[in-house]
Amino acid sequence: MITYTMSTADIHPSHLTGFFVGWPNPPSPERHLAILNAASHVVLAIDDQSGRVVGFIYAISDNILSAYIPLLEVLPEYKNQGIGRELVRRLLDQLKDFYMIDLICDDNLRPFYEKLGLKYHGGMIIRNYNRQSGS
């Protein structure tokens, strides 16, 4: 069974292992927790049996007009169970009163987000991969 929460209060770095698969410089679990704690909005998916976080999504926002969703991740062994869809649904519900909610994703993920009501729009980015770990 998966439980969803909007709080990081009982989360420890040991609950956040296995994320950022394929990243050359992933954040450590400690840094990952710091990122989630700094977010304005967060939703976590927790496996009730293990207590492990198996998915997360968060937003950063001015809490007035706009929000940006930087990351959605579900552990590989928990994918294709509707967890990602539920994380997005719950976060968008938290953000429903904002004028703009922005998210940038790889092209192969567009159909996933479009099914959840997001619309394609061009964007610009800079990526400093040497800072990817957040340290």
Image (cartoon, rainbow, N blue to C red):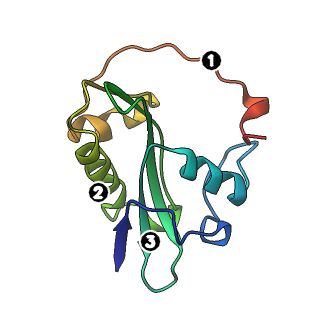
Q: In the image, what residue occupies the spot 64% across and 65% down?
A: 17
**Relative depth, front residue between 61 and 129:** 61
Does residue 41 appear left or right of residue 77 in this picture? left
Q: Earlier in the sequence, mark 2 or mark 3?
A: 3
* Residue 129 percent location from the top left of the image: 73, 30
Q: Which residue is mark 1?
A: 126
Q: Residues within 10 Å of mark 2 (few under 14, many from 20)?
A: some
**Relative depth, front residue between 101 and 84:** 101
* Residue 133 percent location from the top left of the image: 74, 42
Q: Picture quarter containing residue 18?
A: bottom right
* Residue 83 percent location from the top left of the image: 35, 61
Q: Give the farthest residue toward the front.
A: 64
Kindly identify which numbered label has been placed on residue 19.
none
Q: Amino acid at mark 3?
A: Ile
Q: Amino acid at mark 2?
A: Glu
Classify mark 1: helix, strand or loop.
loop
Q: Picture quarter containing residue 119?
A: top left
Q: Which residue is mark 3?
A: 46
Classify mark 3: helix, strand or loop.
strand
Q: Residues within 10 Å of mark 3 (few under 14, many from 20)?
A: many
Above or below for 25 versus 81: above
Q: Which residue is mark 2?
A: 86
Classify mark 2: helix, strand or loop.
helix
Separation of marks 2 and 3 at Cα, in angstroms: 12 Å
Q: Amino acid at mark 1?
A: Ile
Question: Which quadrant: the C terminus?
Answer: top right
